[in-house]
Image (spheres, helix red, strand yellow):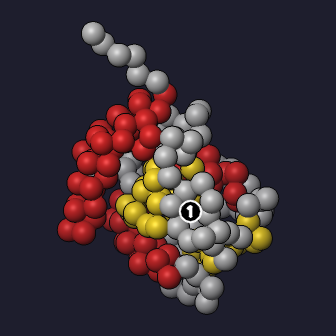
Amino acid sequence: MTTAQGPADRFASALGAALDAWSSPDPDQRVLRAAYRRFLAASGAAAVDRDLGRAHVTGSAFVFTPDLERVVLCFHRKADAWLQLGGHVEPGDASAQDTAYREAREESGLTGLAPIGAGPLDLDRHALGPGFTRCDTHWDVGYGFVAEGEPVASDESAAVRWWPVDALPDAAHPDLVRRLRRAARLARAAR
């Protein structure tokens, strides 16, 4: 008997295939990729549907200028810190890259986002603080994009702006520096 797959199941399958095809040069990312595959296999649709569990996949966007010297960051109200753009998977998203792209457009108002490579630039699993009520763990998949123009803050962010990759704001989230360095290095290698 074959069971029909719903959109969340198809998303989880597509993410598993994308992770299988991705070859990060970083050993820690390869270990984390294996943990992602186990999480997807064990959780199925719940891995990507925030209504089915407190731990789920999210998509992030590292949006750079064409010269890769600046990155768009948003000041996230719940996290009380500057972060990359990104958020939860929505029903219309076919892939984690689609989630990252949609979130980047929604949170920054930037159009004409061009993807950097076909695969992710970064994987990051992190626990969330007390300001987050529906989630406790994000399995974040970070993709790179290039854009130009001036970003505009959304309802979710107090501010959105370009920052030099090598001069992030003091209120940057502690994990952002590590993630952004990896993303920028892989973005340069992909171009």
Q: Position of residue 106 (x, y in %)?
A: 70, 51
Q: Inspect the image, locate mark 1, and give the three-letter code of the amino acid beneath it.
A: Val
- Give the residue at the far bottom of this rendering: 170
Q: Position of residue 45 (x, y in %)?
A: 43, 35
Residue closer to the observer: 116 or 33? 33
Give the residue at x 49% y 28%. Answer: 7
Locate residue 85: give its quadrant.
bottom right
- The N terminus sits in image quarter: top left
Crowding at dot 1, Cα within 10 Å, few <14 / some 14-19 / many 20+, comes out as many
Q: Position of residue 108 (x, y in %)?
A: 70, 59
Residue 72, can we see it? no
- The C terminus sits in image quarter: bottom left
Q: Is residue 181 left or right of residue 101?
A: left
Give the residue at x 63% y 78%. Answer: 81
Residue pointed to by mark 1: 63
Residue closer to the observer: 182 or 158? 158
Residue closer to the observer: 92 or 135? 135
Q: Position of residue 93 (x, y in %)?
A: 55, 37
Residue closer to the observer: 165 or 176? 176
Q: Is residue 146 left or right of residue 27?
A: right
Give the residue at x 47% y 60%. Answer: 137
Locate residue 27: give its quadrant.
bottom left
